[in-house]
Structure formats: C-alpha cells, structure tokens
Image (spheres, rainbow, N blue to C red):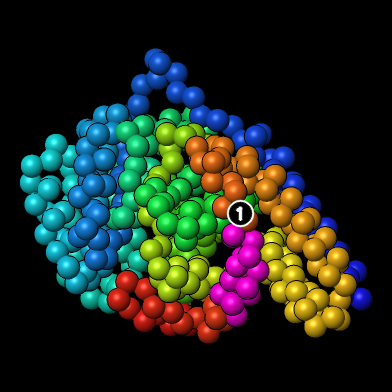
Amino acid sequence: MMSWLLMVLLAAYSWVIIRRWAAWPKLPEVTIPENWQPTIKLTVIIPVRNEAATILYLLQDLEKQTYPHALFEVIVLDDHSEDNTASIVSLFAQTSPLVIKCIELNNYVNYTGKKAAVQKGIELAEGELLVFTDGDCRVQPAWLQLYAYTYQTWQPKFISGPVSFYNTESLLERMQLVEFASLIGIGGASIGLGKPNMCNGANLGYTKQAFEEVNGFTGNEGIASGDDEFLLHKISQAHPEKVFFLKHKQAIVYTEARKTISSFLSQRIRWASKWRAYQQWHVKLLALIVFIVNLLLFVALCMAVAGQLPVSVFITAIVVKFAVDFLFLSRILSFLGRKQYIWYMLPLQLVYIPYVVVTAILSLAGRYHWKGRTIQNR
C-alpha cells in the first residue's frame, strides 16, 4: 500500500514540476528597443528594519539606475529599527540627486510590521507604478527601466521579478541558493501557466490602483508575513491576465542567504506559516503535494530502515524525485547564471526531506522569531 501511495504522489509531483519546466522557456523575455522613451513615474518602496549594515549599498545602486532620476522617487519606511538605519538614509538623502524620503513608523500610531510599512509607503507614493525591494538587497542598473518598459508595454497589474543570492561561500549558503532557485522558478513558471502562486517581496511591482481595488491587505492582517503573495493571489483573481513575470537577467535582485541554520529555519517557518491562509485551491494543492511527497519519503526511509519497506522502493522514489528536480533546476539555475551550483542538489537532497517536514509542522503554531521580534500569527 505504501509503495503505491508513494508512486502515485510522486507521479503528481513530477507532473507539476515538468509542466513548469516546459512553461519556463515560454515566458516572454523582455527586450527594450533602442528608441523606447520612458514616460511613467515610479515609486520605489523599501520597508526596512535594522538594515544599517546594508541599506547604503542599495541606495547607491538606485543612484546608478539607467532610468531617468526625474521619473522615480524612493520611499524608505523604517519599521522601528534598533540601529541607525533611519539616520543613514536621511544623511544619504541630503546629498543624493534622487528624491529620497525616509519615513519612520514610530511617528505613527499602531503602525508596526512590514505590512504597515508597505501600507504607509503606498499611501505616500506619487508614482503610477510601485516597485518594491528590501533593505538588504542589491539591484542592477537596468532594474527600474525593465519595470517601466514592462508596465508600458503589457500594462500588467502585478509584476513579479527574479531573486537570487550572492556572496554564497559556505555549503549552507550554496544549498540555499539552489533551493531558493526552485521557488523562484516555480513562481515564474506558474505565472506563465496562468496559475500564480509564489513571488518574493524583494522584487515586485504593482499599481496603487490595483492595490486599492482588492482592498490591499484586508483579510490577511493577522498574518505577519505574506504581504507579497496574498496580494498576488488577490490581484490575479481579479485580473487573471494581468500578472507578469519579469524574465530578464538584468532584473534579478540579489540578497544574501541566511548565515546560520537557526536563522534559515526561522525564515522558512515564517514563509510556511502563511500557507493555511491561502484562499485559492490550486495554490493550496501545490503546497500540499510538495509537503505530502516529502512526508511520504521521510516515512518510507524510516520503514526501509526498519525492514518494513523494500529498500529498492525508497531508492527508486528518491531517484525519480532527484531526476525531476535536476531537470527543472538546471533550467532555472542557467537563467540565474548559477548552473555550476546544480551539484549542490546532492547534499541538499539529504536534508531537504526532513527540513520540509519539520518546517511545515513548526509553522502550524504560527510563531517564530524574526529581526529581533517574536511574531505570533493570528
């Protein structure tokens, strides 16, 4: 019975991954014509908390944008930082050619957390298209130009962009890069299939009109994370044809992987804690298939060790899953310029099954630690 159940779920998992492997190359690749003239005003919104060590690099990257400085503004929302993040931003703004506003949430009543920071940034934004990233990220010179061209050309309501890691020196960081690439690839390919499920707040854009039309974060206020994905689901439901994945190497936003296992687990528990609040069935189904496949593989391993399941069945299942993941990740890592990291799938496979099971179970409590806070989802 266990063997049949495992094979059926593996077949479902393989179908999901292979469909997205086939959808990835069909995503339109943005190419900006030489005679293109930008016309729209952008607002870059950056929610931050305790980013004194990194925020300056991001602001310098924004100064290097090829998009005309007169056509975008930058709003940094400081979420009660315990370091000098706000003073660094304010000092930089005094001499920068950019329009940079530093908004401190401690000046507002009941404004705490990332959702509150994003909400306040949207309220103050003057741009037609809002573009979001995080304070610990690095962006490339053509980043805003690609967003503006995409918006002017296709008129999407929501744009999701690719994210990857840099400064990946340790085994842990390189394994994270490979695992994270799968999330980016699944998110982008699912948009191509017309079934958006994942995106990342480090690289996305949407219009103020679309945000207001779906009542913003209403309905998800009790979930501390998920400001990006919940909004993606709501906008895609209201405008199924107006969600776009910005597939271009110059649109990749870079951030750093977690340096320790504990901070990595806290991050993944934070991400996993929002799945129960998903409303669309295809989003829940995908998350459920991934979890159950890994849970069954974990159980199968235990049964094989105990002699209750032929070892050949477990090995076959692992080989099938590895082959499907290898096929998909080869394509995504090539796009990210990190194809040489594909072999880090081998050590990743050893820990991935128990990692998925453990984080999924721990996320059920909805409690985790992040950036000096203890968060409890309601």
Instruction: Identify the residue at horizontal 83%, vertical 70% (top origin).
Output: 311
Q: Say which residue appears at 66% left-offset and 34% top-offset.
A: 26
Residue 325 in sight from this viewpoint: yes
The residue tagged 1 is: 345
The span shown in magenta is 347-361
Query: In this rendering, would 271 be left or right of 121?
Result: right
In the image, residue 104 sits, relative to residue 195, either above or below, namely: below
Badge 1: how crowded within 10 Å, few (<14), some, or many (20+)? some
Indicate the amino acid at tag 1. Answer: Met
x then y, percent, for residue 113: 33, 71
Magenta-colored stretch includes residue 357: yes
Residue 9 vertical placement versus 362 (above, below): above
Q: Residue 237 location, x and y as percent?
A: 61, 55
- 79 vs 149, left or right, is left
- In x, y percent, where is residue 101? 18, 51
Between 378 and 314, the residue placed more toward the observer is 314
Count of marks, rendered view: 1
Quadrant of the image occupied by residue 242: top right
Q: Name the residue located 54 percent from the left edge and 46 percent from the top edge.
A: 341
